[in-house]
Amino acid sequence: MPEHTESAVQDTNQPTRCGFVALIGAPNAGKSTLTNALVGSKVAIVSPKVQTTRTLVRGIAMEGPAQLIFIDTPGIFSPRRRLDRAMVTTAWTGAHDADVVAVLIDAKKGLDDEAEGIIGKLDEVRQPKVLILNKVDLVDKEKLLGLAQALNTKARFDTTFMISALSGDGVADVRKWLAGHVPEGPWHYPEDEVSDAPVRMLAAEITREKLYLKLHQELPYQSTVETETWTERKDGSVRIEQTIFVERESQRKIVLGKGGQTIKAIGEAARRELAEIIEQPVHLFLFVKVREDWGNDPERYRQMGLEFPKE
């Protein structure tokens, strides 16, 4: 796995700190991009399609004597289906279980209905809260200051940051502040670890990202990817077999593409990124299957780390 961008040399005079930081916000606010920037490594999938993060992705960053465990929660929105409800419940659970809650707002969208809905529920969250305005490079300064003031009037934030998760501007300041505000205590993970997600799950998420990037206009987000086999070969390479599950035959044809060209492109993009992350040659084989109504199958929810809503 790639090493952290920040040195984790420990000062014996300083007590170690360790804490969970939940990143919450509306879909496409930039939580996954910010998680990756804070960690300094790819741990969360990034896609222009909303609601691509479904579970609590944990990324781990070192900042001096502090270990920060970032929880990239699913986007919070008005749920319509069972999968939507499970994702929103997971996001708020992540916030209530964290040591610090970072609320990410898309500065370009400002205080829209989704942001209002999240801000309105923050009174129920007792942990220290940080406001992070993202995509500030796309908004003029006067509007930014007005937005920050309006948000701080509506909820109590310990501090406010203005950043661009994509370019990395302001990200180091966020990490430094958080490092000083998580509880004192021993680290939960080795200092060179960047995520607690099993590598098979990360591999599936990377393929799902490439699927969305290629087909986000054509394919509903009710598709999922599962890593079926992971075989270490004698030559040092890895053979990975994954299945992409969709709900209808028409969707299967979209994923395959004419003459199999679409799935070939998805597989090649995923293979390249996987090889870079695990630092081994990768042989990736993708299959597409129809699994009707998987969005109402409790077993699928368990595999994704989500609680199955009863209704």
Image (cartoon, rainbow, N blue to C red):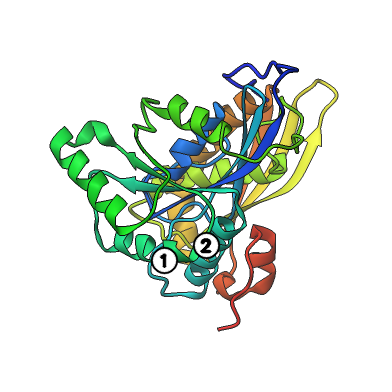
| Discs 1/2, front | 1
**Taking the image as drawn, is residue 42 in sight?**
no
Which of the 4 image quarters holds residue 297?
Answer: bottom right
Above or below for 59 versus 8: below
> Is 44 left or right of 31, judged from the image as shown?
right
Given the image, on which type of amino acid does mark 1 rest? Lys
Secondary structure under the numbered disc 1 in the rendered image = loop
> Is 122 left or right of 307, judged from the image as shown?
left
User: Split into 4 quadrants, where in the image is the N terminus?
Assistant: top right
Q: Which residue is mark 2?
A: 92
Residue 298 percent location from the top left of the image = 66, 73
Instruction: Please name the residue shown 64% across and 41% down the image.
Output: 19
> Is 108 left or right of 39, judged from the image as shown?
left
Instruction: Please name the residue shown 54% across and 67% down the image.
Output: 89
**Comes first in the chain, label 1 or label 2:** 2
Q: Which residue is mark 1?
A: 121
Instruction: Please name the residue shown 58% across and 37% down the image.
Output: 43
